[in-house]
Amino acid sequence: MNNYPKNNSRKALVSFFLLSTALLSACAANEPIVEAEPTATETIVATEASSGAITAPINASCTAVSSQDREDALLNSPFASVSAADWVRGGDEPAVSIIEYGDFQCPFCGALAPILAELEARYPDDLQVAFRHFPLIGSVEQPIHEKAKLAAAASEAAGKQGFFWEFHDLLFVAQSEWTNLSEAEFIKFLMDGASDLGMDTAVFEADMLGDELQTLAEQAWIEGREIGISGTPFLIVNGFPYQGPSDVFSLDAIIKMEMLRERHFNECPEFTIDTDAEYTATIQTEKGDVVISLLPQIAPVAVNSFVFLAENDWFDNVTFHRVIPGFMAQGGDPTGTGFGGPGYTFEIETNSNYLFDREGLLAMANSGPTSNGSQFFITFGEASHLNGGFTIFGEVLQGMDVVRSLTARNPAEDPTLAPGDLILDVIIEVN
């Protein structure tokens, strides 16, 4: 068990924009692609604080994610946006679009198909899925998937009669049945499928074997390589390549993070708190209230951010997504995945007079010394291994029994757990 409170927002950004979350095997042009992940830094960086001095400057510790940088990157993307030329299903005005460059003979694409279908069912209005062909044809001398070209042409022939997605699903569901068939047997399989779906089989056969769709499949293979697609499935999420884990949990987390982007703050909060005042935060949960004394003199940036987020309803209806008895309870991520953040990050603030030596301490979760965001945790006891690496910015005054009653859960060990206990609201009072 990793006994560090983690804010995984940086890891998620690395995985999404740099294509490097975890090992991914895929169907490839020459051999299986393995994208090795440089894992996110979780080493604790200790900071020596003398005489209780604050170690992070108030005016130089926050960095906001620029929406303009994202827009500029999309303008230079080689991957075309979803258009009327694509085969699309899902929401008409989605928050998230996933484009799959796929090959019907690729087993990894076959494994992905039911996962995307499940996500479409979860997000009928917020998710749109598009399928683009990248049949791994290879060459005459070195063919890769010998039936990929014909399968792509068949799906397009079905599409001409309004049955693309039905044929798409049929090819993936029955993939193991037709992969090892001879060409003649495979054509019969395709014809039988068209007949079962109620298509005009004579027109279907002529279209499937005609020059137009055979050329279309060949061009998809050529053009895909020209824009840098090296294997399948190759996913584009909201315009950016994603080659991280393609299980339901990981893709669901990416979708939730993209939906959270609409709530991001693209500027760091203005510093508005009075460091000489007394701030109290009441975390109202479905199991009762937790009253916390904040520490603006010890961690001004963290307190300022927490107050800002609370006053902007960031924590409302957010779950305690990670609760480990004897260690800590963690919340503050609206996605409930442990990957979400507010759109800005800031440095840790440590103080030699405030150490993890007791229960009831409120601190920021992070994945590195500059990655504080919105995720926080409350300790259940002494945790000296966190000293110097995490910002303590408050202490529980009342309601520690409520904290202890929170439902234990660790999504790192079981991502299928039911959601944790909810934060209903966070009320800030100033004296």
Image (cartoon, rainbow, N blue to C red):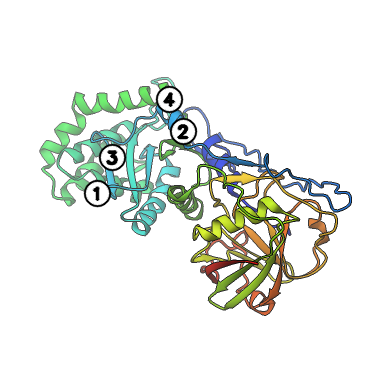
Q: Amino acid at mark 2?
A: Gln
> Which is closer to the viewer, label 3 or label 2?
2
Q: Quadrant of residue 56?
A: top right
Residue hosting label 4: 76
Quadrant housing the C terminus: bottom right
Q: Which percent across, then down, holds residue 116?
A: 39, 50
Q: Secondary structure at mark 1?
A: helix
Q: Secondary structure at mark 3?
A: helix
Q: CA distance from mark 3 to mark 2?
A: 49 Å
Residue hosting label 1: 166
Q: Earlier in the sequence, mark 4 or mark 3?
A: 4
Question: Which residue is rendered at x = 45% and y = 43% of the image?
Answer: 108
Q: CA distance from mark 4 to mark 1?
A: 34 Å
Q: Residues within 10 Å of mark 1 (few under 14, many from 20)?
A: some
Q: CA distance from mark 4 to mark 3?
A: 41 Å
The answer to the question of whether label 2 and label 4 lie on touching residues, with beta carbons closer than 8 A, is no
Q: Amino acid at mark 1?
A: Glu
Q: Amino acid at mark 3?
A: Phe
Question: Which residue is rendered at x = 26% and y = 40% of the image?
Answer: 87
Residue hosting label 2: 68
Q: Amino acid at mark 4?
A: Asn
| Residue 14 in the figure: left or right of residue 55 | left
The answer to the question of whether label 3 and label 2 lie on touching residues, with beta carbons closer than 8 A, is no
Question: Which residue is rendered at x = 29% and y = 28% of the image?
Answer: 217
Q: Which percent across, then down, holds residue 251?
A: 47, 50
